[in-house]
Amino acid sequence: MSLQSLSFASLNLRIRKRVFDLFFNHQIKKNYCNQFEHFITYMIVLNMAGLVLEHIPVIYETREHLFHIFDVVSLAIFSIEYALRLYVAPEDPAFSSAKYPRLAYFKSPFAIIDLISILPFYLGALFDADLRVLRALRLLRLFKLFRALAPAVNEFLELNQDKSYRYKIYALVNETPTSGNLHHIFDMFIVTWVILSVLAVIFESVQSINYYLHSEFIILDGIAVAIFSTEYLMRIYSSPEDPKYKGWLLGRLRSASRPTSIIDLLAILPFYLEAVLHHLFDLRFLRVFRLMRLLKLARYSGATQSLFIVIKREWPVMKAAVFIMLLLVMLAACLGYLFEHEAQPDKFE
């Protein structure tokens, strides 16, 4: 073998190792692995949203070229991801021990999903046939999300192997030293559903969109309520793990009285009130309160958390200020009445 070939092989090995360490090695903390996975996750979610919007003629027909551009960009990103994973397979401990690491990766479930999710586009480009039915295979991109979930679950179970069931739930919904990456995935999952549910409420008010997706909006709202209800119960159930909320009953009541817990409750309460009392009262107006789900995002914003802390700390001062303002308003109203009611009696009826 020539010196040039050896040099090229050595360079290839270094590049391959570098790419793997930068984007796919979970053992290295300071790399771009999490950012890369988050980016792919966001792209998958956007693709799912695009698939839904494609079935709304009023949106799709006037913006078909934009959907096509987005589909091409997504395909390029997922193709590059697939190619990179195939390229670095010999560095991946899951495949490096195989005789042919790349073949082992190629036959793995996630690789098959990756390939099938991009295959329809290439088949349509190569063959002069109507393969639009294969576009439904793009839904398989949703399963790509499990690639990030599997190692996070294993990490979480390893970190909490000697912990109680309640503590595991607490570590999942709250950031703790043993939460791992699964907690961040859980947060991202909740944030995604908050955004989806709020967007659904907004689009539901557009008659032309609601006409096509009325049933889908109902289903989506039901799923969102189920998810938020489960999250709420998980937080209340596991709250005694926090020293501030010790106590089987009182601790949970104190936890439930927190502003963030009240927001969580208000986010799901309209659904249950309407479901239970719809035969007694017309409670459709409560649906507008579903927009309060946006306030759930406050839990995931450091700036908003700081604002809540400041409000709590300065609450006595704010109450005094509100009291003084009310006094001034009442005083101004009384003075206005005394001096003006004779001149403008019709204004004070």
Image: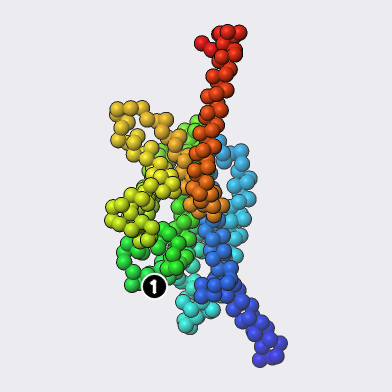
Callout 1: SS: helix
Kindly identify the amino acid type of the residue bearing the numbered disc 1. Answer: Glu
Total marks placed = 1
Would residue 92 be visible to someone looking at this image? yes
Would residue 25 be visible to someone looking at this image? no
Quadrant of the rendering where the N terminus is positioned: bottom right
- Give x and y (percent) for residue 215: 41, 38
Q: What's the residue at 56%, 60% (across, down)?
A: 39
> Who is closer to the viewer here, 208 or 137?
208
> Who is closer to the viewer here, 192 or 47?
192
- Give x and y (percent) for residue 73: 62, 55
Residue that mark 1 sits on: 158
- Give x and y (percent) for residue 3: 70, 90
193 relative position to 161: left or right: right
Q: What's the residue at 31%, 64% (across, down)?
A: 165
- Give x and y (percent) for residue 63: 61, 41
Q: What's the residue at 58%, 68% (across, down)?
A: 32
> Who is closer to the viewer here, 164 or 282?
164
Which residue extends farthest right? Answer: 4
